[in-house]
Image (cartoon, rainbow, N blue to C red):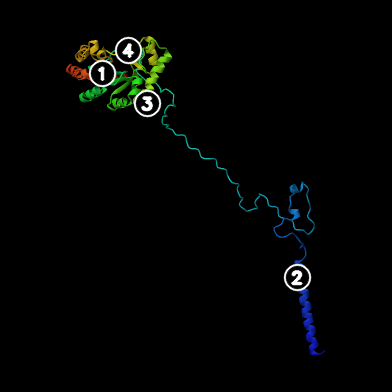
Amino acid sequence: MPASDGRRRAAALALAGALVVVAVALALLLPGRTAGPPSGAPSPSAVSPSARGGQTTTPSPGASVPVQVTDTPEAGETPVQPPVTVPPLTEPEPTDIPPQPPAPGTPPQPAPFPESLRGQDLTAIPAAGRVVALTFDAGANAAGLPKILSTLSAKGVTGTFFLTGNWVANNQAAVAQIAAAGHRVANHSMTHPGFTGLSNDQIAQQVRGAEQAILAAGADPRPLFRFPFGERDARTIAAVNSLGYVAVRWTVDTLGWKGTSGGISAQVVADRVRAGLQPGEIVLMHIGSNPDDGTTLDADALPQVIDNIRTAGYGFTTLDALLAR
C-alpha cells in the first residue's frame, strides 16, 4: 500500500475515534433532560393541590420534581424566628402624686380646727395670756383701710381681717395688700345677712361664696368665721362648724362704726378697748366709714388703742392663736 494511503486511513480512524468520544459524551449528558418552562416560571407540577381545587398530580417519568419550600429548617440550619410583637412600654405609676387642684365648682376641703371649739361663738382666746387680738370687719367700704394698715405697720402689730365676699369683689387689690402685709384674713359671709333667718343651704352658700371670693383674691379665710351683726344660735353655729369653720365673736365692740352722728368719738373708742382689757381679749373694729357722717373712728383711734394696750403690759396676737390649742 502506498504511504499516502496509509496516512489517509490513519486520519480517518482518528476522526472516527473522536466522533465516538463526542457521541459518548453527548449520550451521558442528554438522558433525563426535558424541555421545560423558561427559568423563573413555575412548573405545572409545582402548583400545590390546594391551588388546583384539591386534585393531586403525579409527575411524568423523567420530569424534574420541584423542591417544596417549607418553614421547617434543614438540619444544622438556624431557624428564622417570626417577628416578636413588643407591647408598648407603660410608665410606672408615681409613688408620690402631687395634690391636684379641685375641679371648678368643687368646694375646698374644710380646714380643721380644735374639737374643743365646736359649738361655740368665742368671745375671747382661752388661756392666751396677756395678749390682745385686734380684728377688723369689712362689709361696707374701704375708707379706713389705708390708715389702719399704715398704723399697724408703724406699730409692728398684726391683725385679723374679716371680709365679706362682696367687699372682696369690690376691693381685690386691698385683699392682696392685707395679705402681703402679713395679716390674717377670715370669712364674714358673702353679703352680710342675719344668719338665724337662713336655711342651712343658704348658710352654706353664704360661707362658701365668701370663701371662694377670698381664695380667688389670693388669701385663705379658713377656718375663722364671724357672724354678721353677731346674730347666731346653736343651729347656725353648728351649720358653720359643719363647713369647717370656728365661730369667733368679740370681747369688746368699740362702737366706732356708729360715727360722730351716733355720739361716738375716737377717744370713746380707745377708752372702751382699755376698759375691756383682759388676757385673750378680742377687739371688734371696722374698716368702713359711717354712711351718714363719713367718719372712720376706728382707724383714727387705732394708734392710741395700741399704745394703751402696750402701756398696760399686753402684747398682740392674731386669731390663729385659737388654732394652736
The amino acid type found where label 1 is placed reads Leu
- Neighbours of disc 1 within 10 Å: few (<14), some (14-19), many (20+): many
Q: Are marks 1 and 3 in contact (CB under 8 Å)?
A: no
Q: Secondary structure at mark 4?
A: helix
Residue at (76% x, 76% y) in the render? 18
State left or right for residue 271 relative to residue 34. left
The amino acid type found where label 3 is placed reads Ala
Q: Position of residue 193 (x, y in %)?
A: 36, 14
Residue 216: image tag = 3
Look at the image and tell me whether residue 111 can be seen: no
Residue 229: image tag = 4
**Residue depth check, mark 1 versus mark 2: number of the one nearer the observer:** 1
**CA separation in Å, label 4 and label 1:** 18 Å
Q: Are marks 2 and 3 in contact (CB under 8 Å)?
A: no
Decide which of tag 4 and tag 3 comes sooner along the chain: 3
Closest to the observer: 178 or 119? 178
Residue 134: image tag = 1
